[in-house]
Amino acid sequence: MGETMYYNLKTYRDESGKVLGYELCEVVKKEDGKYYRTSDKNLKFPQAKVKATVAKYPDRFCNLKITSDGRLIETGKSSEESSSSSSNAKGYIGVTPMNWRDKLVFNVNGNEVMKIDRNFIKWLNEKLGVHSKNFKLRINSYIPYATLQYQAQELGKRKSLLVNNDRVVVGVNEAIGEVLVLSSLPVYLENKGSYHDDGLFQGVKFKSVELNTVSMTPNSNCHSMFRKCGIALVTLNSLNASYIKDFSYMFEGAICNQVSFFGIDTRSAEHMGSMFSSATIDKLYLTNLNTSNVKNMDNMFYKANIGLMDMRGLQTSRCEVFRKMFEGYRSASRELDVSTIDTSNAYDASEMFKNARVIIRGTERLDFGMANTVDSAFENTYLQTGDFRNMRLDNARYANNLFKGCHIRGGMSLPRVTSGGVTTADKMFYGCDVSGGIDMSNFEITKYMSHNDFCANMNGKLVCKNFEFENGRVVKKVQ
């Protein structure tokens, strides 16, 4: 016998409820009287194209039809209902949005677990529509059976029970504005985000998301997990991500009131590039975030706007890439304390604080002795003091624009900075404003450096090993 393909499409709308188009979420193949789910396409089509196709092949679409007056509507039918009633659906997993019972529970190594993926989170968000931002999402695992059934009864009374079986309960408690996802089984989150693909909570809106005693699936990452989300409060109370290496773009572009990493296991994390880039977060608590094995923090807070940030637990001793880590960083506190940041193993620290719109303090611990480049690391920044007592540039071939346009309260001291391996240091202090002067008497301006541009347009005095400058002009040269 020949095979026939049936399609299940999902409507996606804007915040006002206007239809923007349709997403091909599943394809079902009928072969030899049986139905099989063949693939998840995740392709999107404009409304006009879908309407024309449904009109031409009305029997091929599981949940869409054309009305007598030419409107395209959802029927809510599954693929079985759209086809022959005598069909055998063995081997087929239901594809209608409401049929999540068979989709949420999986067998892993002989054990049943509940798995939550991107499609389920999107479905919940769309189910609530424009009101989703007023609801809290709470996900709990290992719920006792009696408690699970009690919750099911209570939600059933309110006619807001979406999923109910012996292992999983999903419902909306409108009385307290809460969406409950409860399971007696272990709960696993599946996130397969990339910069171009959807993360688990990417773009969704909730009042809060609380994860309690859940784990990431072994094949997951945390890339883009909350990217561009609109979640007021994100609380990671107990999230096992102990084998996840990639946390890049996790909160990139997110808008949150508070993000707390109180109970997340990130012991294997290696990549946190752009983790909070362009994010707007009122309160960010990183105290329990394990970064001891992270090697890459480039763009981590690039153009982020953080009201209050606790970085006391941040470990960076193994980090090699700090490029643009705080470039363009802003904060309502107008300060950035970097005293806990260890840069002793840095290879690339270029533009690390460039254009940061805060007063940087705690610079006395910073050391770039292993760095290959520190170009523009402090360009156009504001420093509370010029205390760089531990700063070294022993291997920094490139130190161009290092303090260009920098504003420093009082004076600056760089006692351990020598020319060492520095090859180019053009405009190192160009336009720098240091009323108390700069002491780097152990640094020798070599023939490979242009002393004319070294501190041109600078306001203040600068003393090097073989030159002395006053307001950007050479006043003394030592032979």
Image: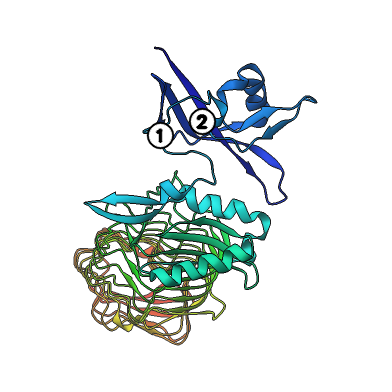
User: Residue at left 22%, top 68%?
Assistant: 318
Tell me where residue 207 sits by quadrant.
bottom right
Dots 2, 1 in contact, CB < 8 A: yes
From this viewpoint, is residue 36 visible?
yes
Q: Quadrant of residue 351?
A: bottom left
Of 214 and 163, nearer the camera is 163
For residue 236, side relative to residue 244 (left or right)? right
Q: Earlier in the sequence, mark 2 or mark 1?
A: 2
What's the amino acid at mark 1?
A: Tyr
**Residue 185 location, x and y as percent?**
34, 62
61 or 313: nearer the viewer: 61
Report how far apart the C-alphas of labels 2 and 1 lie in the structure.
10 Å
Q: Which residue is mark 1?
A: 92
Structural crowding at the residue carrying mark 2, measured as other residues with C-alpha within 10 Å and reported as few (<14), some (14–19) or many (≥20): many
Above or below 44: residue 12: below
Residue denoted by label 2? 80
Q: Is 182 placed above or below 358 here? A: above
Q: Amino acid at mark 2?
A: Glu
